[in-house]
Image: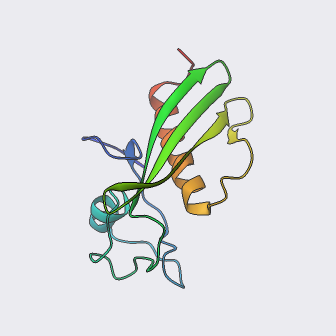
Amino acid sequence: MQEATTRVPLGDLWRGACTAGSIPYRPEDSVASELCNMGYARGRCERYARGSAGDAIRFLIARDENDLIRVAYVVEQDHHPAAHGTLEYFRSAGAFAGDAGNPMLASQALAYVTSYLRRRPAAA
C-alpha cells in the first residue's frame, strides 16, 4: 500500500498480484497505479478479464457506528451502474459478515476499509 496523494477509488494506491490471467503476476507500479487502482482497464490492459461484469467498483462508507462499518458499493460498466449493494464490516472481528459472493469485490472492499481505518481508527 502507498498513501494516495490524490483521491483514488480504494483510498490508497495498492500493490499486489494480478489474478486476471491464468497465472498471477505482479504488475509494475505505474501499471498498478494507472490501471489496476483506477479501474476501466478494458482495452488498455492485455490481462483484462474479457467478459468481466464491470469496469470498476466504487465504494463509500454508508455507516460507521460502534463496531459496524457498512460499506456501500456500485459496480460500474461503461460508466453506468451495473450492480450495487452493501457489505458489513465488524471492527471486533476484523472482517466482513458473510460472503461477498465475488472474491474481487471482497478483496477490493477490504482494501477500501483498510484505507478508511488507517485514517479513522475509531468510530466517530
Which residue is at the front of the view, 32 or 76?
Answer: 76
Which residue is at the front of the view, 49 or 15?
Answer: 49
Provide residue 31's location: percent of width, then percent of height. Answer: 30, 68
Q: How is the image coloured?
A: rainbow
Q: Is residue 24 above or below residue 70?
A: below
Provide residue 121's location: percent of width, then percent of height. Answer: 54, 24
Q: Is residue 100 above or below residue 61?
A: below
Instruction: Judge left or right: residue 84 versus residue 69.
Output: left
Q: Residue at x 56, y 23 (%)?
A: 64
Q: Residue at x 32, y 73 (%)?
A: 42
Provide residue 15's location: percent of width, then percent of height. Answer: 43, 59
The count of marks equals 0
Furthest residue toward bottom: 22
Q: Residue at x 69, y 41 (%)?
A: 95
Provide residue 89's location: percent of width, then percent of height. Answer: 65, 36
Instruction: Judge left or right: residue 74 versus residue 105.
Output: left
Q: Residue at x 55, y 61 (%)?
A: 104
Q: Is residue 94 above or below residue 68?
A: below
Q: Quadrant of residue 27?
A: bottom left
